[in-house]
Amino acid sequence: MRSISVFGSTGSIGESTFDLLMRQGGPERYRTVALTGGRNVARLAEQARSLKAELAVIAEARLLPDLRAALAGTATECAGGPMAVAEAAERPADWIMSGIVGAAGLAPGFRALSHGSVLALANKESLVTAGPLLMARARKHGATILPVDSEHSAVFQALLGENLATVEHITITASGGAFRDWPMERLAAATVAEASCHPNWAMGQRITIDSASMFNKALEVIEAKEFFGIDPDRVEVLVHPESLVHALVGFRDGGMIAHLGAPDMRHAIGYALNWPDRAHLPIARLDLARIGSLTFRNPDPARYPALRLAREVMRIGGLAGASFNAAKETALDAFIAGRIRFTDMAAVVEKVLDRLSATGGLGKVPDSIDMVLDIDGQARRIAAETMQ
Amino acid sequence: MRSISVFGSTGSIGESTFDLLMRQGGPERYRTVALTGGRNVARLAEQARSLKAELAVIAEARLLPDLRAALAGTATECAGGPMAVAEAAERPADWIMSGIVGAAGLAPGFRALSHGSVLALANKESLVTAGPLLMARARKHGATILPVDSEHSAVFQALLGENLATVEHITITASGGAFRDWPMERLAAATVAEASCHPNWAMGQRITIDSASMFNKALEVIEAKEFFGIDPDRVEVLVHPESLVHALVGFRDGGMIAHLGAPDMRHAIGYALNWPDRAHLPIARLDLARIGSLTFRNPDPARYPALRLAREVMRIGGLAGASFNAAKETALDAFIAGRIRFTDMAAVVEKVLDRLSATGGLGKVPDSIDMVLDIDGQARRIAAETMQ
């Protein structure tokens, strides 16, 4: 029986993971070592009951009594607080979903790698902020990291049976987000509500706004570079409004392998869950004749300055990814709170990178998660100062 | 040093193969066991000199003295006639290109499989007429058949690292040919010259006309079924006027892997030549942003009756493929000679299949190449009678 743990089980990725686990046999097929959630006690308890989880952890410590009450009469052990979440990652499991959003998801995934099992990595920050640390740890313990992100899962699938040395470029696609076709002069006045409408994907508000600014794509470019260990110049972005082709890999013999599919996160999750097999998944099939056409264009550098900043981050390396991510998070908070304009976000991030570059040490390769969390804190402070 | 032989070396596939062999080191890298050509003595001799071939064979026996004269002073042995071509296939080589067009290409490829080496199969008739025989022989001798056809090479590449049991469909694309957008009522009056203009590929006249009628695609559907051993219902055709996506494979998890590339046969040839590596090839790279859009539509069954006939052939199995191919060849000859109309070709083929079905035995699986050649002859005779 395969043992599994899900970190961030009540979030969007976690719910899809839970859905697939239940469809594929639930507790008859999987031994659930641990489920962790942020605040949604009722849902976490429901999932724990359904999967007969051995451990349920709620990240907000004050909610632990509620979780205990909700799981009374079950064999599920309960725990609360961020340390308990990280400790849950110490429990060995064959397959572990790292689905916690943000910097909080970094430590559990990092710890989980020590089991030498499969880490399904949906937490974007992990590779952006601590890519070399994660990849080295996976190598050391013989763990496998599988990307859970439509674009990176697509690249991973396109590279099956291929040799990275023959790759000329990895191209990830971008819908172009909510403002793809807006006149440039309107961008500065874009509201939070306007930025929160994604043309194709149903996702959380933050990632939807990050799609409009392409900060999300910028993170993905950095992730691709870290995960596939490819030269940054070989990672490209193509605007593809239909969001059906998720990535394309070009080889030195002129051939190109692309991955297509409906915009449904359950594909990437299900792929990671069943890898190296492909199991039947309840996902809409593409009917290309009905769809009619797939369109592509280059991203406009003026509209999407985040892509230029990503190139800069990859050039610097080291702690630049963590700084970039933290500055972006802080700027995004400020935009959502109505304190800065949509177009200010990139300017804030650029200032933070400039400030940290000037003090030196930004290119230093982190040798611990603590170093990453330290620069994350610095970048957030500087970003906040910048916006005062 | 890798030993190679090229059958059909002076044809379109052979010339591209020769070009790649020379670019990749020529006689410094490859030991050329045999080159065979049809009638072009001067070109065959040039190639044999460049590659320092051990044997050169001209299929038209009467041209042997010319070949001898052209290769005087070299160490290249000369031979002439169809039997000499087949005998050349008995000489072991690590890599063998089966590039002879038509039924004449069947025997050399079949014989070459006994060496347990790699057979790069460009001869379409081989799999259509004798698929089970070829595949069984390859298995018996541990030989590898690599498809040299943009669509099948594309499918092969899309399936790298995948398990066929997880495939829901294999879709090969079709440009739609010269008459894709013609009004239906004009088709019957289409001239040979009009049918010989391919929108995307520069190919020979016969295959270009077969593109306009989709008899070429019909053969490819049958080939795909034979080569990949997949249920006929899972092989699909999609009209894709740009001819840049060559094939798509859909998996049961909803993911789809596609192969794209410039319409240049040297990709499939170079892929087969360098497999399992991918070497740098002098092929135009696709710039999807510049291309802008890729379009798709379902083939119109009324415009392309050949696709329906292919389904019928796959349903019958056995000798139906050989009958279909021979009837098609005969009908195509008659169309080119101005003896039947464009739209008569499918009718002739259908009549031949009906006649042979009625006599029974069409579904019999051939146990020798002779059985295949025998039904080929019968089908040609019936087709000729039908057109009198």
Image: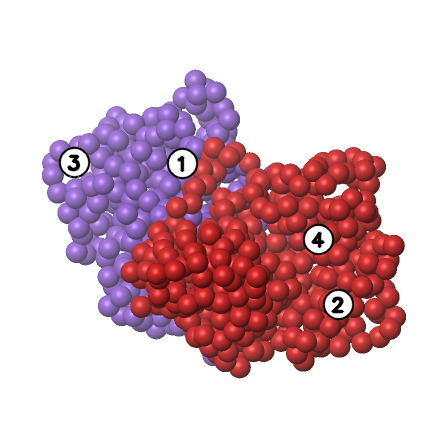
Chain colours: A red, B purple
Q: Is residue A189 left or right of residue A278?
A: right
Would you place residue B94 above or below residue A20 in this image? below
Q: Position of residue A349 (x, y in %)?
A: 80, 58
Q: Secondary structure at mark 4?
A: helix
Q: Secondary structure at mark 2?
A: helix
Q: Do marks 3 and 2 both belong to one polypeptide chain?
A: no
Kind of residue at disc 4: Phe
Would you place residue B193 above or below residue A247 in this image? above
Q: Do marks 4 and 3 both belong to one polypeptide chain?
A: no
Nearer the viewer's eye, disc 4 or disc 3? 4
Q: The numbered mark 4 sits on a residue in which chain? A: A
User: Cα distance, mark 4 to mark 3?
Assistant: 64 Å
Q: Is residue B12 left or right of residue A358?
A: left
Q: Are marks 4 and 2 in contact (CB under 8 Å)?
A: no
- Residue indicated by mark 2: A377
Nearer the viewer's eye, disc 2 or disc 1? 2
Q: Do marks 1 and 3 both belong to one polypeptide chain?
A: yes
Quadrant of residue B140 within the rendered picture: bottom left
Mark 4 or mark 2: which comes first in sequence? 4
Would you place residue B211 above or below residue A31 in this image? above
Residue B214 bears which disc, if any?
A: 1
Kind of residue at disc 3: Ser
Nearer the viewer's eye, disc 1 or disc 4? 4
Mark 1 or mark 3: which comes first in sequence? 1
User: Cα distance, mark 4 to mark 2?
Assistant: 19 Å
What residue is shown at x 52% (from left), y 34% (from top)? Answer: A292
Q: Position of residue B186 (x, y in %)?
A: 46, 19
Q: Quadrant of the C terminus of chain A?
A: bottom right
Residue at the extreme top: B185
- Residue indicated by mark 3: B357
Kind of residue at disc 2: Gly
